[in-house]
Image: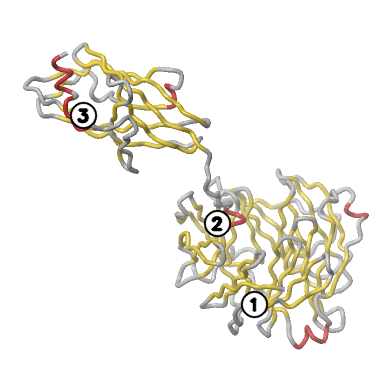
């Protein structure tokens, strides 16, 4: 017993003056304290989010201040919650701790449910057992969890692309993508990111390259790989559940490919586009209710082509679109409606058109549902002051006009209103990065602008 008293002397003397509530617990290490029972030592890991773990350095656990060597015979964690704690002293079992030698070790606690968790850690030195109570508390995660797909936005910076979130009415930078600044960037819920580079040709904006990365929980994006698309006539891309989707037109034939990002080398796998419908080109994708939807464009008739999550073809829907040269530029699955934005010269002058469909209708019934078209503005006004870009939010469409004003179109009102922003919109803004209930971000080639708005 003399050896044990000397062994733990360096721990006991400074701690005896503490109350049972005195816990020394920092982000990097913890110390041993006494509880109400002076013979019981407590190693407290504190509060830990249930399902996560916390590792701590336990300082000066053994410090031999005697004149002789001491032996560590065994160490074990026991009790109902023993599996929730990990203390590994295997490197020291059977070893001799020389006079003056000391060491620390790392302990880990991993609560799998809420509430207090305890276990007993016993170490035997020279035939004498010393027991410690291991303690932690599983708690709920009170921090909001970012949804990669819904809460992260991309703003081109100087040679890179910034990942940001919106906190209140402020931009909070989370990290940086090592992609060219002109990349068109999309992301899925698993953190896969794809950025595309387009050709500089005026009338045929095909994609040249796709850059791939994956974001981790700390918003570090490791460069992964790229795909050369120069041999394909791809005009659009999207990313969903670890798959890259590519769409375009080869002459008068629609083409679409998928790439499984979890398998290398990357392989472009053609999608099954039915020959029974006259599809000319794929210009966008939608993902909702375990559906994958291809949006056919260029000349009438136009179609929505439906697949399940395993990419099995499940049906098609012929769109009731009047304009011969009406081009669907963006598609969006909102809370209740499918919204298709298109421009057309088939009405006598270029106009912006919203086509709405009932999102709740299943594929088998969707052919019986008439889609509805609404002009965003009268054709003459659109011709002199065209729409520059569109962004969807919930069941609303937001349009940036050439005169640096923003229109909001809501299917419930079936009309457009001009929004009031807190500051004037900068000139030459080219696109809408994001919009929510009170904030909109615009960008051009070199700058971006955050504005708040009211109706």
Kindly identify which residue carries mark 1: 421
Depth order, front residue of 4/349: 4
Position of residue 151 measured from the top left corner of the image (x, y, whole percent):
59, 57
Kindly identify which residue carries mark 3: 11
Position of residue 33 measured from the top left corner of the image (x, y, whole percent):
29, 30
For the N terminus, which image quadrant? Answer: top left
Q: Callout 3: helix, strand or loop?
A: helix
- Mark drawn on residue 39: none
Marks 2/1: CA distance? 31 Å
Question: Residue at 44% of width from left, 27% of height from top?
Answer: 84
Left or right of residue 182, residue 371 in this image: right
| Residue 233 appearing in the image | no
Kindly identify which residue carries mark 2: 193
Q: Callout 2: helix, strand or loop?
A: strand
| Residue 204 appearing in the image | yes
Depth order, front residue of 169/17: 17
Position of residue 347 measured from the top left corner of the image (x, y, whole percent):
87, 80
């Amino acid at each position: 017993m003399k050896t044990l008293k000397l062994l733990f002397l360096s721990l006991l003397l400074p701690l005896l003056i503490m109350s049972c509530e005195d816990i020394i617990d920092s982000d990097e290490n913890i110390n041993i304290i006494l509880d109400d029972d002076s013979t019981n030592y407590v190693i407290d890991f504190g509060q830990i989010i249930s399902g996560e773990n916390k590792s701590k350095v336990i300082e000066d656990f053994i410090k031999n201040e005697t004149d002789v060597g001491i032996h560590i015979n065994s160490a074990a964690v026991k009790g109902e919650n023993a599996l929730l704690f990990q203390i590994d002293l295997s490197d020291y079992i059977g070893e001799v701790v020389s006079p003056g030698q000391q060491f620390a070790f790392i302990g880990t606690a991993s609560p799998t449910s809420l509430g207090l968790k305890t276990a007993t850690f016993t170490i035997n030195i020279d035939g004498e057992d010393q027991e410690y109570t291991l303690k932690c508390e599983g708690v709920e995660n009170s921090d909001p969890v970012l949804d990669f797909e819904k809460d992260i936005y991309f703003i081109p910076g100087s040679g890179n692309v910034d990942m940001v979130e919106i906190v209140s009415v402020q931009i909070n930078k989370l990290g940086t993508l090592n992609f060219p600044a002109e990349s068109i960037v999309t992301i899925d819920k698993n953190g896969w990111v794809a950025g595309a580079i387009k050709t500089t040709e005026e009338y045929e904006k095909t994609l040249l390259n796709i850059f791939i990365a994956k974001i981790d929980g700390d918003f570090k994006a490791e460069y992964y790989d790229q795909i050369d698309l120069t041999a394909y006539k791809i005009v659009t891309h999207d990313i969903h559940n670890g798959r890259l989707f590519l769409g375009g037109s080869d002459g008068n034939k629609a083409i679409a490919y998928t790439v499984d990002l979890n398998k290398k080398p990357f392989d472009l796998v053609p999608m099954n586009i039915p020959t029974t419908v006259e599809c000319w080109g794929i210009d966008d994708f939608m993902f909702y209710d375990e559906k994958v939807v291809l949006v056919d464009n260029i000349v009438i008739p136009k179609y929505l082509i439906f697949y399940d999550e395993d990419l099995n073809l499940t049906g098609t829907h012929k769109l009731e679109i009047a304009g011969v040269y009406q081009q669907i530029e963006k598609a969006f699955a909102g809370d209740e409606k499918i919204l298709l934005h298109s421009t057309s010269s088939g009405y006598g002058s270029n106009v912006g058109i919203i086509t709405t469909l009932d999102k709740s209708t299943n594929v088998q019934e969707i052919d019986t549902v008439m889609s509805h078209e609404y002009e965003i503005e009268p054709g003459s006004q659109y011709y002199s002051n065209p729409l520059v870009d569109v962004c969807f939010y919930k069941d609303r469409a937001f349009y940036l006009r050439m005169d640096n004003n923003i229109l909001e179109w809501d299917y419930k009102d079936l009309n457009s209103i001009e929004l009031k922003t807190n500051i004037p919109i900068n000139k030459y803004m080219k696109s809408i990065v994001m919009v929510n209930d009170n904030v909109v971000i615009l960008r051009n080639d070199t700058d971006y602008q955050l504005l708040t708005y009211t109706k």
